[in-house]
Every structure is written in structure tokens, then in C-alpha cells.
Amino acid sequence: MDRIQQRILAEVADLHEVPEGAYNIRANGQMAGRSTTANIDIISKTEVSGIDIRIQPGTKHESVHIPVVLSESGMKDLVYNDFYIGEDSDVVIVAGCGIHNCGDQDSQHDGIHRFHVGRNARVKYVEKHYGEGTGEGKRILNPVTEVYMEEGSSMEMEMVQIKGVDSTDRRTKAELAAGAKLVVRERLMTHGTQYAVSDYVVALNGADASADVVSRSVAKDQSYQKFDSRIVGNAACSGHTECDAIIMGDARILAVPQLEANDIDAELIHEAAIGKIAGEQIVKLMTLGLTEEEAEAQIVNGFLK
């Protein structure tokens, strides 16, 4: 991998050297590196582009890194990745995509990830998106995530996009069996004329299943964001979804939290708040020696942490 690809890899996966454990690194549509362990196998698909990641039951304290980097203008990349997480396992999965585009053609990566989480398994999933480059070509990312959780399993998803992506359409669907727990934390920032849509549909199908889907976002300049979250309670379950957004400049934000209760014992809550930065917050920081621009940046950074 060249220096540009290595830098992008550090941005999206915090990788500054070859990671421990299992990994599959994809660069400009080709495999750039792969390693497996005794408990985690990575197998290339034969009919479509992508991989199967198989994690043995009972695997504990292991990780899988599957980052993607694009550095060629005009590149269109599509992958199908399936994760099979064995019962009673406890693992961390780090994905993400970074695009460096200095040309005049659009570069795009679409990733379809399907997670099959076994009974009583625990998964932490981190997905970061990043874009850079001085070209007129756009940096486009359209991730699709499907999650199928068996009884007693849990999954924490950290979805981050805070720089350089011109257009993204994120689609996430989850189905939870009895006692399964899903936590989603999305952090998003758009600027310029960037466009970002986040669409979540979570079906709580079993007794005591629970979901907590929270988005924090900042929209600047003329950018546009849409947060659409729907939680469906099909059993005695609990669900919460929340959108908390800061709007700046001439940006636009649409928040659409939705609840659907199909069981008398489904307990579902939604919240949404959109507003500008309070003037007194900026003034207070300016009295400490910051410029208005620096004060604004401090507030935004703290909000997105």
C-alpha cells in the first residue's frame, strides 16, 4: 500500500501498523492483506465480491479489522460481507471506508454487511467513514447493514462520519429475538453541499428485546441531513430512539423518529431536538481567549464526542 492508502487506513480503522488478530484490508477493489486466527476465518466469496467472516462459538477477546480504502478517481466498489458470530463469543469488529479523490470523476464504495449474531454472543462493531482530496469528483459511501440477533445476544454499533464524504445513504435493519439488546451510537457531521441520509428499522420480535438508537449530528453551510429511525415492538420489549442535532449556516435537517407498537407490553420512546449553538456558549469561551471560530469548533467537537 502507498502512503496515501496507509494514511486513510489510520483514519478509518486507527491502524498504523499490521493489526493483531484477524484482518482483511481492501484497497482499490483488491485484497491488500489478510490474516486469520484459530477462531476466526475469512473466506473470499466466489459469486460476488466480498468475504465471509466466521467466528467460532466461545471466541473471547478477539478482533477483526476489515477496512476499505479507495485512492483512484472514478473507482466504483461494491462488496458483500457476511459475519457469522458463534454463540457465547465476545468480539470486536472494526470496519470503515476512506476515499481519497483528487480527480474529476466520482469515487464510490457500497458495502452490504450482514451480521448473524449467535445466542448469548456479544459484538462491538465500529464503522468509520472518511473522505479527502482536492478533486472535483465526489466521495460517495452507501453502506447497508443487516443485523439478525438470536436470543440473549447483544451488539453495540458505533457509526461515525465526520469529514469529507460528499454523499452517503446509510440503511440499517435489525431483527432481535428474545432478550437480545442493540445499542447504536451515530456521530455525523456534514458541511459544504454534502448530503447524508441515515435510515434505521429495528424490529423487536422477542420478549425482553431492547434497542437504543441515538444520533448526534452537526450540519454546516448548505448541507442536508435526514435521520429516519423506526422501532417496531412486536413483543413485550423496550425501545428508544433519539436525534440530537446542531444546525449552522444555511443547512437543513429532517428528523423522522417513528414508533410502531404491535404488542400491549411494548414500551417505546422517541426524542428529537434540532437547534443552533447558543450565543452565550460562544461568548463564554471567547472570554477565555478563544476566537469565535475556535469557540464554535470546541463546542462542535465536544458535542460529537
Image: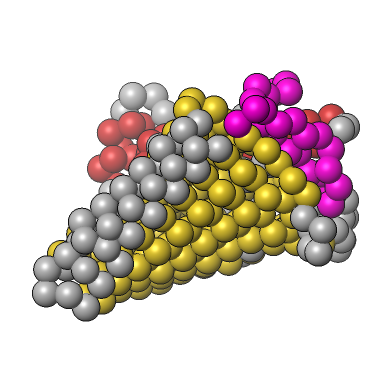
- For the point 75% across and 39% down, the residue is 25
Residue 235 is one of the magenta-drawn residues: no
Residue 23 in view: yes
Horizontal and vertical percent for residue 80?
69, 59
Looking at the image, residue 237 sits to the left or right of residue 300; the answer is: left
Horizontal and vertical percent for residue 27?
82, 44
Residue 23 is one of the magenta-drawn residues: yes
The image shows residue 59, relative to residue 128, as above or below, that is above
Horizontal and vertical percent for residue 220?
50, 56
Looking at the image, residue 266 sits to the left or right of residue 155; the answer is: left
Q: Quadrant of the N terminus?
A: top right
Q: Nearer the viewer, residue 200 or 253?
A: 200
Q: Nearer the viewer, residue 296 or 40?
A: 40
Image quadrant assignment for residue 17: top right
Horizontal and vertical percent for residue 164?
65, 50
Image quadrant assignment for residue 284: top left
- For the point 17% across and 75% down, the residue is 263
As drawn, the residue found furthest toward the left would be: 264
The image shows residue 174, relative to residue 304, as above or below, that is below
Residue 220 in view: no
Q: Quadrant of the C terminus?
A: top left
Q: Nearer the viewer, residue 229 or 26?
A: 26
- For the point 79% across and 63% down, the residue is 48
- For the point 23% across and 64% down, the residue is 270
Magenta-colored span:
15-39
Looking at the image, residue 179 sits to the left or right of residue 94; the answer is: left
